Amino acid sequence: MAKIALFGATGTIGALVLREALGRGHQVTAVVRDPARLAGSPAAAGAEVVHGDVLDPHSVAAAAAGRDVVVSAVGPGAGDPGVLVTAAKSLIGGVCTLDAETPRPRVITVGGAGSLRTPEGPPVRDATGIPEAVRAVMQAHEKALDFLRTVPVEEVRWSCLSPAAQIEPGERTGTYRLALDDLVVDEDGRSHISTEDYAVALVDEIERDAHTGKRFTVGY
Ligand SMILES: NC(=O)c1ccc[n+]([C@@H]2O[C@H](COP(=O)([O-])OP(=O)(O)OC[C@H]3O[C@@H](n4cnc5c(N)ncnc54)[C@H](OP(=O)(O)O)[C@@H]3O)[C@@H](O)[C@H]2O)c1
């Protein structure tokens, strides 16, 4: 059983990570900007809910202390995509303030698919027809990942799980394929994953610790 601090538990992906982790018996603390949003929610039954802000390193440190893993499933919504970079820096900065003598919690972030290489070679973000707002989020995820890649795993054991190009609520099959920096594409050329199976892969990573210091991705 892992002690997990989860930022973004009210979001589409975070809510399913919360459900998957609780379902496997992990001890989850949902760190949310407005605890009232989860109060009494059946989705959060069994989780501790505390107030916190991923953009504040002090808040991250308070949430991370005594935990095995800090997961960030935060997203900018319709706001400034730059919060993804600020969040990555705050997560690492906050965890770094914790005593290194007792192992610091691992950090696992939900990334973006834009920087993944397509089978044709260029990254997803270079495709034509991507709306400007989506491209801006892709670029912010890439900057956040570039930052994480500067963090020595001796300081913080981080990993970043990029979804497939398409991720949407669907079925929990428990089956998926992983890759590192290459987009996972099925035999029909589609890159997709249900949000449920994304959550399975993320909680598997919490349990297996197989991608420390790496970005990896999941698809069918
Ligand atoms: N194919 C892809 O590459 C792909 C596809 C989908 C999503 N994603 C990425 O996956 C992540 C999650 O996406 P989603 O659709 O689940 O997002 P979402 O539904 O918009 O949820 C975003 C979450 O972030 C939280 N949040 C935002 N700012 C915060 C802060 N300062 N402190 C604490 N929590 C904060 C929100 O909490 P509040 O309730 O307080 O607002 C919410 O829980 C995003 O980074 C998104 O870009 C990637």
Image (cartoon, grey):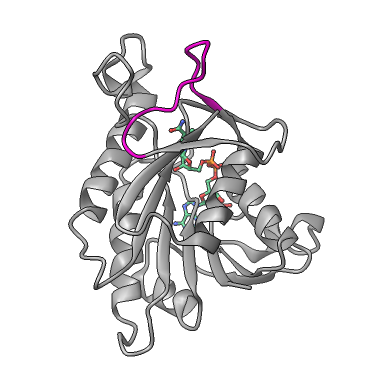
Residue, x 35% and y 39% (percent of image)?
A: 180
Up the image or down, 83 lies above or below 28; here it is above
Up the image or down, 175 lies above or below 183; here it is below
Quick check: is 68 in the magenta stretch?
no
User: Which sits in the foreground, 153 or 51?
Assistant: 153
Residue, x 54% and y 68% (percent of image)?
A: 5
User: Which sits in the foreground, 66 or 182?
Assistant: 182
Residue 168 vs residue 130: left or right? right
User: Which sits in the foreground, 118 or 67?
Assistant: 118
Q: Quadrant of residue 198?
A: top right
Residue 173 vs residue 34: left or right? right
Asked if residue 8 can be seen in this view, the reply is no
Residue 35 vs residue 66: left or right? right
Most common SS among magenta residues: loop
Asked if residue 65 can be seen in this view, the reply is yes
Image: magenta residue range: 180-192
Up the image or down, 147 lies above or below 127; here it is below
Q: Position of residue 152 (x, y in %)?
A: 20, 65
Q: Position of residue 81 (x, y in %)?
A: 35, 40
Quick check: is 191 in the magenta stretch?
yes
Q: Quadrant of residue 50?
A: bottom right
Residue, x 46% and y 45% (percent of image)?
A: 75
Q: Position of residue 219 (x, y in %)?
A: 51, 31
